[in-house]
Image (cartoon, helix red, strand yellow):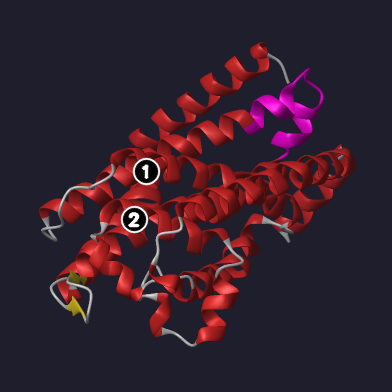
Amino acid sequence: MNLRTIRIGLRRGWAEHTHLLKDRKELFGSMIGTVGGFVLMILWAGDTPLEGTGVNVATFMTAGFLAFAVFGACLMTFPMALAADREEGTLLRLRGLPGGIPAYLVGRATTLLCQIAVQSVLILATGLIVGGVAPPRDWPTLIWVLLLGAVAVVPLGAAIGSLLPNPKTAAGILVFPMLGLMIMSGVIVPVTRLPEIVGTIAQVFPLYWQGLGLRSALLPDSMLAAEIGHSWRLPQVAGVLAAWGVAGMLIAPSLIRRVTRRESGSRLAERHLAAKR
Protein backbone atom coordinates (compact mmCIF):
# COMPACT_ATOMS: atom_id res chain seq x y z
CA MET A 1 0.00 0.00 0.00
CA ASN A 2 1.41 3.42 -1.01
CA LEU A 3 0.41 7.05 -0.53
CA ARG A 4 -1.49 7.13 -3.83
CA THR A 5 -3.59 4.14 -2.76
CA ILE A 6 -4.30 5.77 0.59
CA ARG A 7 -5.34 9.06 -1.06
CA ILE A 8 -7.69 7.21 -3.43
CA GLY A 9 -9.17 5.29 -0.51
CA LEU A 10 -9.68 8.44 1.54
CA ARG A 11 -11.47 10.16 -1.34
CA ARG A 12 -13.62 7.11 -1.92
CA GLY A 13 -14.51 6.86 1.77
CA TRP A 14 -15.42 10.55 2.03
CA ALA A 15 -17.59 10.33 -1.09
CA GLU A 16 -19.45 7.32 0.36
CA HIS A 17 -19.96 9.17 3.63
CA THR A 18 -21.42 12.27 1.95
CA HIS A 19 -23.70 10.02 -0.11
CA LEU A 20 -24.87 8.36 3.11
CA LEU A 21 -25.73 11.74 4.63
CA LYS A 22 -27.84 12.59 1.57
CA ASP A 23 -29.70 9.26 1.52
CA ARG A 24 -32.48 9.61 4.11
CA LYS A 25 -33.21 5.87 4.28
CA GLU A 26 -29.56 4.95 4.85
CA LEU A 27 -29.07 7.83 7.26
CA PHE A 28 -32.01 6.74 9.40
CA GLY A 29 -31.07 3.08 9.34
CA SER A 30 -27.39 3.41 10.14
CA MET A 31 -27.20 6.54 12.30
CA ILE A 32 -30.49 8.00 13.47
CA GLY A 33 -31.85 4.56 14.38
CA THR A 34 -29.14 4.03 17.01
CA VAL A 35 -29.74 7.47 18.51
CA GLY A 36 -33.51 6.87 18.49
CA GLY A 37 -33.04 3.69 20.51
CA PHE A 38 -30.85 5.61 22.94
CA VAL A 39 -33.55 8.27 23.40
CA LEU A 40 -36.16 5.61 24.15
CA MET A 41 -33.90 3.97 26.74
CA ILE A 42 -33.27 7.33 28.44
CA LEU A 43 -36.98 8.17 28.55
CA TRP A 44 -37.76 4.72 29.92
CA ALA A 45 -35.16 4.42 32.69
CA GLY A 46 -32.74 7.33 32.43
CA ASP A 47 -33.42 8.78 35.88
CA THR A 48 -33.03 5.46 37.68
CA PRO A 49 -29.95 5.53 39.95
CA LEU A 50 -27.42 2.70 39.90
CA GLU A 51 -27.26 1.57 43.52
CA GLY A 52 -24.07 2.47 45.35
CA THR A 53 -22.52 4.48 42.52
CA GLY A 54 -24.13 7.93 42.53
CA VAL A 55 -24.65 7.53 38.75
CA ASN A 56 -27.98 7.32 36.94
CA VAL A 57 -28.82 4.96 34.09
CA ALA A 58 -28.70 7.72 31.44
CA THR A 59 -25.07 8.54 32.25
CA PHE A 60 -24.07 4.87 32.31
CA MET A 61 -25.85 4.14 29.02
CA THR A 62 -24.17 7.07 27.27
CA ALA A 63 -20.82 5.30 27.60
CA GLY A 64 -22.43 2.01 26.61
CA PHE A 65 -24.05 3.37 23.46
CA LEU A 66 -20.80 5.06 22.43
CA ALA A 67 -19.01 1.71 22.70
CA PHE A 68 -21.74 -0.10 20.83
CA ALA A 69 -21.78 2.53 18.05
CA VAL A 70 -18.15 1.62 17.28
CA PHE A 71 -18.68 -2.09 17.72
CA GLY A 72 -21.88 -2.20 15.66
CA ALA A 73 -20.45 -0.14 12.79
CA CYS A 74 -17.28 -2.22 12.54
CA LEU A 75 -18.73 -5.69 13.17
CA MET A 76 -22.15 -5.40 11.53
CA THR A 77 -22.26 -2.53 9.03
CA PHE A 78 -18.79 -3.18 7.62
CA PRO A 79 -19.07 -6.99 7.20
CA MET A 80 -22.50 -6.68 5.60
CA ALA A 81 -21.22 -4.04 3.18
CA LEU A 82 -18.21 -6.20 2.32
CA ALA A 83 -20.42 -9.24 1.71
CA ALA A 84 -22.74 -7.15 -0.48
CA ASP A 85 -19.85 -5.78 -2.53
CA ARG A 86 -18.51 -9.30 -3.06
CA GLU A 87 -21.98 -10.50 -4.10
CA GLU A 88 -22.41 -7.65 -6.58
CA GLY A 89 -18.99 -8.18 -8.15
CA THR A 90 -17.36 -5.00 -6.84
CA LEU A 91 -14.40 -6.87 -5.34
CA LEU A 92 -13.94 -8.85 -8.56
CA ARG A 93 -13.74 -5.66 -10.61
CA LEU A 94 -11.37 -3.99 -8.14
CA ARG A 95 -9.08 -7.02 -8.18
CA GLY A 96 -8.11 -6.16 -11.74
CA LEU A 97 -7.05 -2.62 -10.82
CA PRO A 98 -3.61 -1.78 -9.38
CA GLY A 99 -4.10 -1.20 -5.67
CA GLY A 100 -7.86 -1.68 -6.07
CA ILE A 101 -8.48 -3.86 -3.01
CA PRO A 102 -6.23 -1.85 -0.60
CA ALA A 103 -7.85 1.41 -1.76
CA TYR A 104 -11.29 -0.17 -1.27
CA LEU A 105 -10.43 -1.19 2.31
CA VAL A 106 -9.03 2.27 3.13
CA GLY A 107 -12.22 3.78 1.72
CA ARG A 108 -14.46 1.52 3.78
CA ALA A 109 -12.44 2.26 6.91
CA THR A 110 -12.72 6.00 6.22
CA THR A 111 -16.49 5.74 5.82
CA LEU A 112 -16.71 3.81 9.07
CA LEU A 113 -14.65 6.37 11.00
CA CYS A 114 -16.83 9.20 9.66
CA GLN A 115 -19.95 7.28 10.61
CA ILE A 116 -18.59 6.58 14.09
CA ALA A 117 -17.69 10.27 14.55
CA VAL A 118 -21.20 11.42 13.58
CA GLN A 119 -22.88 8.80 15.77
CA SER A 120 -20.64 9.66 18.72
CA VAL A 121 -21.49 13.36 18.47
CA LEU A 122 -25.21 12.58 18.22
CA ILE A 123 -25.10 10.20 21.20
CA LEU A 124 -23.17 12.68 23.37
CA ALA A 125 -25.54 15.51 22.39
CA THR A 126 -28.56 13.33 23.14
CA GLY A 127 -27.15 12.40 26.54
CA LEU A 128 -26.48 16.04 27.39
CA ILE A 129 -29.81 17.41 26.13
CA VAL A 130 -32.28 14.60 26.83
CA GLY A 131 -30.64 12.71 29.68
CA GLY A 132 -29.04 15.63 31.52
CA VAL A 133 -25.66 13.85 31.37
CA ALA A 134 -22.60 15.87 32.39
CA PRO A 135 -19.98 16.59 29.70
CA PRO A 136 -17.04 14.13 29.50
CA ARG A 137 -14.54 14.74 32.28
CA ASP A 138 -11.59 13.46 30.22
CA TRP A 139 -11.82 14.35 26.51
CA PRO A 140 -8.38 12.96 25.51
CA THR A 141 -9.24 9.54 26.96
CA LEU A 142 -12.64 9.60 25.26
CA ILE A 143 -11.03 10.28 21.88
CA TRP A 144 -8.19 7.74 22.08
CA VAL A 145 -10.49 4.99 23.34
CA LEU A 146 -12.93 5.61 20.47
CA LEU A 147 -10.11 5.59 17.89
CA LEU A 148 -8.26 2.61 19.32
CA GLY A 149 -11.54 0.75 19.71
CA ALA A 150 -12.26 1.24 16.02
CA VAL A 151 -8.73 0.10 15.08
CA ALA A 152 -9.24 -2.99 17.26
CA VAL A 153 -12.34 -4.21 15.43
CA VAL A 154 -12.18 -2.85 11.84
CA PRO A 155 -9.80 -5.66 10.73
CA LEU A 156 -12.00 -8.18 12.55
CA GLY A 157 -15.02 -6.82 10.69
CA ALA A 158 -13.17 -7.25 7.40
CA ALA A 159 -12.35 -10.84 8.27
CA ILE A 160 -15.97 -11.59 9.21
CA GLY A 161 -17.26 -9.94 6.03
CA SER A 162 -14.97 -12.09 3.90
CA LEU A 163 -16.39 -15.25 5.52
CA LEU A 164 -20.10 -14.38 5.34
CA PRO A 165 -21.92 -16.47 2.70
CA ASN A 166 -24.04 -13.58 1.38
CA PRO A 167 -25.52 -10.24 2.55
CA LYS A 168 -29.04 -11.67 2.91
CA THR A 169 -28.03 -14.01 5.73
CA ALA A 170 -25.45 -11.64 7.25
CA ALA A 171 -27.85 -9.86 9.60
CA GLY A 172 -29.26 -13.13 10.93
CA ILE A 173 -25.79 -14.52 11.54
CA LEU A 174 -24.43 -11.40 13.27
CA VAL A 175 -27.30 -9.93 15.27
CA PHE A 176 -27.57 -12.53 18.06
CA PRO A 177 -23.83 -12.77 18.83
CA MET A 178 -23.75 -8.96 18.85
CA LEU A 179 -26.65 -8.73 21.30
CA GLY A 180 -25.07 -11.40 23.49
CA LEU A 181 -21.76 -9.52 23.64
CA MET A 182 -23.57 -6.25 24.32
CA ILE A 183 -25.38 -7.75 27.32
CA MET A 184 -22.39 -9.59 28.80
CA SER A 185 -19.82 -6.81 28.26
CA GLY A 186 -21.25 -4.34 30.76
CA VAL A 187 -22.49 -1.69 28.34
CA ILE A 188 -26.16 -2.11 29.38
CA VAL A 189 -25.79 -3.08 33.04
CA PRO A 190 -22.61 -3.10 35.16
CA VAL A 191 -20.74 -6.34 34.57
CA THR A 192 -20.37 -6.86 38.34
CA ARG A 193 -24.16 -7.31 38.50
CA LEU A 194 -23.79 -10.39 36.28
CA PRO A 195 -22.45 -13.84 37.27
CA GLU A 196 -18.68 -13.84 37.77
CA ILE A 197 -18.09 -16.26 34.89
CA VAL A 198 -19.82 -13.80 32.55
CA GLY A 199 -17.44 -11.03 33.56
CA THR A 200 -14.45 -13.33 33.03
CA ILE A 201 -15.60 -14.23 29.50
CA ALA A 202 -16.47 -10.60 28.69
CA GLN A 203 -12.89 -9.51 29.36
CA VAL A 204 -11.71 -11.61 26.42
CA PHE A 205 -13.54 -9.36 23.95
CA PRO A 206 -12.74 -5.75 22.99
CA LEU A 207 -16.26 -4.42 23.64
CA TYR A 208 -15.81 -4.76 27.40
CA TRP A 209 -12.49 -2.87 27.37
CA GLN A 210 -13.75 -0.11 25.13
CA GLY A 211 -16.80 0.33 27.35
CA LEU A 212 -14.53 0.47 30.41
CA GLY A 213 -12.31 3.12 28.82
CA LEU A 214 -15.28 5.24 27.79
CA ARG A 215 -16.80 4.98 31.26
CA SER A 216 -13.52 6.25 32.72
CA ALA A 217 -13.84 9.36 30.53
CA LEU A 218 -17.53 9.98 31.20
CA LEU A 219 -18.35 8.73 34.68
CA PRO A 220 -17.22 9.87 38.14
CA ASP A 221 -14.89 7.73 40.22
CA SER A 222 -17.86 6.71 42.38
CA MET A 223 -18.72 4.32 39.50
CA LEU A 224 -15.61 2.30 40.36
CA ALA A 225 -17.71 0.55 43.00
CA ALA A 226 -19.43 -1.31 40.15
CA GLU A 227 -16.28 -2.10 38.13
CA ILE A 228 -14.13 -5.23 38.24
CA GLY A 229 -11.16 -4.58 40.53
CA HIS A 230 -12.60 -1.12 41.38
CA SER A 231 -10.22 0.42 38.85
CA TRP A 232 -10.46 1.90 35.33
CA ARG A 233 -7.37 -0.12 34.27
CA LEU A 234 -6.57 2.21 31.36
CA PRO A 235 -3.17 0.61 30.56
CA GLN A 236 -4.96 -2.72 30.16
CA VAL A 237 -7.64 -1.06 28.05
CA ALA A 238 -4.96 0.22 25.66
CA GLY A 239 -3.09 -3.09 25.67
CA VAL A 240 -6.07 -5.34 24.95
CA LEU A 241 -7.51 -3.09 22.23
CA ALA A 242 -4.08 -2.79 20.58
CA ALA A 243 -3.63 -6.57 20.73
CA TRP A 244 -6.98 -7.14 19.02
CA GLY A 245 -6.06 -4.60 16.36
CA VAL A 246 -2.70 -6.26 15.65
CA ALA A 247 -4.26 -9.75 15.55
CA GLY A 248 -6.94 -8.54 13.14
CA MET A 249 -4.40 -6.87 10.88
CA LEU A 250 -2.44 -10.13 10.69
CA ILE A 251 -5.47 -12.31 9.94
CA ALA A 252 -7.80 -10.13 7.84
CA PRO A 253 -5.56 -9.43 4.79
CA SER A 254 -4.94 -13.14 4.13
CA LEU A 255 -8.64 -13.94 4.39
CA ILE A 256 -9.57 -11.10 2.04
CA ARG A 257 -6.88 -12.12 -0.46
CA ARG A 258 -8.15 -15.68 -0.33
CA VAL A 259 -11.73 -14.58 -1.00
CA THR A 260 -10.81 -12.26 -3.85
CA ARG A 261 -8.62 -14.94 -5.48
CA ARG A 262 -11.58 -17.31 -5.45
CA GLU A 263 -13.86 -14.77 -7.12
CA SER A 264 -14.47 -15.20 -10.85
CA GLY A 265 -16.95 -14.13 -13.48
CA SER A 266 -18.50 -17.60 -13.55
CA ARG A 267 -19.00 -17.64 -9.77
CA LEU A 268 -20.58 -14.19 -9.92
CA ALA A 269 -22.92 -15.28 -12.74
CA GLU A 270 -23.92 -18.39 -10.78
CA ARG A 271 -24.83 -16.30 -7.73
CA HIS A 272 -26.88 -13.84 -9.77
CA LEU A 273 -28.70 -16.73 -11.48
CA ALA A 274 -29.43 -18.37 -8.13
CA ALA A 275 -30.75 -15.06 -6.74
CA LYS A 276 -33.26 -14.78 -9.57
CA ARG A 277 -34.73 -18.22 -8.97
**Residue depicted at x 77% and y 58%:** 274
Magenta span: 89-105
Tag 1 residue = 141
Tell me where residue 70 appears, x and y as whole percent.
46, 50
Decide: few, some or many residues near mark 2? Use Cα within 10 Å; few <14, some 14-19, many ≥20.
Answer: many
Q: Furthest residue to the top?
A: 4
Three-letter code, disc 1 = Thr
Q: Which mark is residue 229?
A: none
User: How far is the residue under mark 2 from the one under mark 1?
Assistant: 8 Å
Q: Are marks 2 and 1 in contact (CB under 8 Å)?
A: yes
Tag 2 residue = 216
Quadrant (top left/top right/bottom left/bottom right) for the N terminus: top right
- Check if residue 104 falls in the magenta segment: yes
Can residue 24 be seen here? The reply is: no
**Residue depicted at x 39% and y 28%:** 18
Camera-side residue: 70 or 272? 70
Horizontal relation, residue 277 to residue 13: left or right: right
Camera-side residue: 191 or 90? 191
Tell me where residue 100 appears, x and y as whole percent.
73, 24
Horizontal relation, residue 11 to residue 65: left or right: right
Quadrant (top left/top right/bottom left/bottom right) for the C terminus: bottom right
Three-letter code, disc 2 = Ser
- Label 1: state its secondary structure: helix
Q: Furthest residue to the bottom?
A: 195
- Label 2: state its secondary structure: helix
Where, by quadrant of the figure, is residue 133 drawn? bottom left
Question: Eyeballing the image, is 10 above or below 108?
Answer: above
Where, by quadrant of the figure, is residue 68 drawn? bottom left
Labels 2 and 1: the sequence-earlier one: 1
